[in-house]
Image (spheres, rainbow, N blue to C red):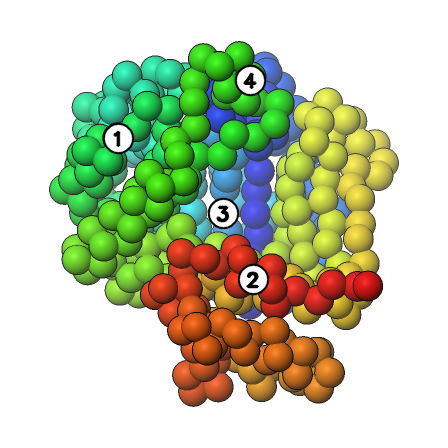
Amino acid sequence: MAGIYIHIPFCKRRCIYCDFFSTTQSEKKDAYIQALCKELEQRKDYLENERIDTIYFGGGTPSQLQKKDFEKVFSIINKVYDVNPDAEITIEANPDDLSAEYLESLTALPFNRLSMGIQTFNDHTSRLLNRRHTASQAIDAFKRCREAGFQNISIDLIYGLPGETLEGWEKDLDQALALHPEHISAYHLIYEEGTALWKLREQHRVEEVDEDLSLAFFTRLIHRLKEAGYIHYEISNFCLPDRHSRHNSSYWQGKRYLGCGPSAHSFNLKSRQWNIASLDAYIEGITNHKKVSELEELDLYTRYNERIITNIRTCWGMPLQTLKEDFGTDLYNYCLEMARPHLEQGTLEIKDGILKLTEEGIFTSDGITSDLFWVDD
């Protein structure tokens, strides 16, 4: 089983923290959809006829597209690829795009999962982040999604926001849990270089939260969601039973995926490929059959490091027998040797032949992962 990621780069306006490729050039949507469909057709052999189990429209803001745009894309996908009838098909959406009329158009399409970017229910912070919705609009949009028939909804939250307190984070969690979505993704704010938020920090107009408060936010997140019946299946992701993101989980489990659109990444087990992060260059290149991507062949040690960073961060962990079969005895023994201090400290454990983080290890996962990496001297 494989996945397809479709990057929709259009946004009404950019959030100050975002470093994903996006554009406000909405007048180029038609040309973009045309190029996107061509890329999907041109790269039909990339996944080697493997059946498609997940399709994910990310962005940018996919909810900036209209029904006719999606129909064109799905028409090409269904023509060229073998799509599992039970495929998970996700659309990312902004709350303010989800009017009753727009949701009605989505229900006529194959989407069966919706991921809503709420980020925070604090209106003051939303304005600072340049979000386009208020808390009440987000809540109303969620309710409309339910009324429209969506029974698999994910919401995104961000914590560690400028000026955020533990009390404020509790209120965000209260409201999120009151909606009872099937899935919650919660990420700590990152000050990405080159973003408007980075510049505000450099100008001392906003400050990062300190490390102790960050840890308190993460601890509260885990405890509150666990108490509410959510499974902590990946560092930043929580779900009700059997409602994990099948698409994102395929990244962490090392499955093949094709990424189409500017800046989209692809992986076929042997190499990684990524498209140019320019709308104009992408459209021109695809239209005229020019190169629009870069390719990196993955050697044994790079693939080993990628296996570590993806597998260890999930509740499913890393099957050690598979590690030995895929990378050989030397790297298998190396991994166990580097894991030994963490096994002794109780931050890693081996259960049924699977190496995984313990509850305590989740809090130091970056350091643990780094220790397991192969470093070429």
Name the residue beneath numbered marker 2.
Answer: 369
Name the residue beneath numbered marker 1.
Answer: 165
Decide: is 148 above or below 168. below
Question: Mark 3 and mark 1 in contact (Cβ < 8 Å)?
Answer: no
Question: Mark 4 and mark 1 in contact (Cβ < 8 Å)?
Answer: no
* Mark closer to the observer (4, 3): 4
Q: Earlier in the sequence, mark 1 or mark 4?
A: 1
* Label 1 to label 4: alpha-carbon separation: 22 Å
- In the rendered image, which quarter is residue 209 located in? top left
Q: Mark 4 packing: few (<14 Cα in 10 Å), some, or many (20+)?
A: few
Which residue corresponds to the image point at 73% horizontal and 22% vertical from the top-left? 280
Question: Mark 1 and mark 2 in contact (Cβ < 8 Å)?
Answer: no
Q: Amino acid at mark 4?
A: Glu
* Label 4 to label 3: alpha-carbon separation: 35 Å
Decide: is 88 above or below 103. below
Name the residue beneath numbered marker 3.
Answer: 56
Q: Earlier in the sequence, mark 3 or mark 2?
A: 3
* Label 4 to label 2: alpha-carbon separation: 30 Å
Question: Mark 2 and mark 3 in contact (Cβ < 8 Å)?
Answer: no
Q: Secondary structure at mark 1?
A: loop
Q: Is residue 249 left or right of residue 102?
A: right
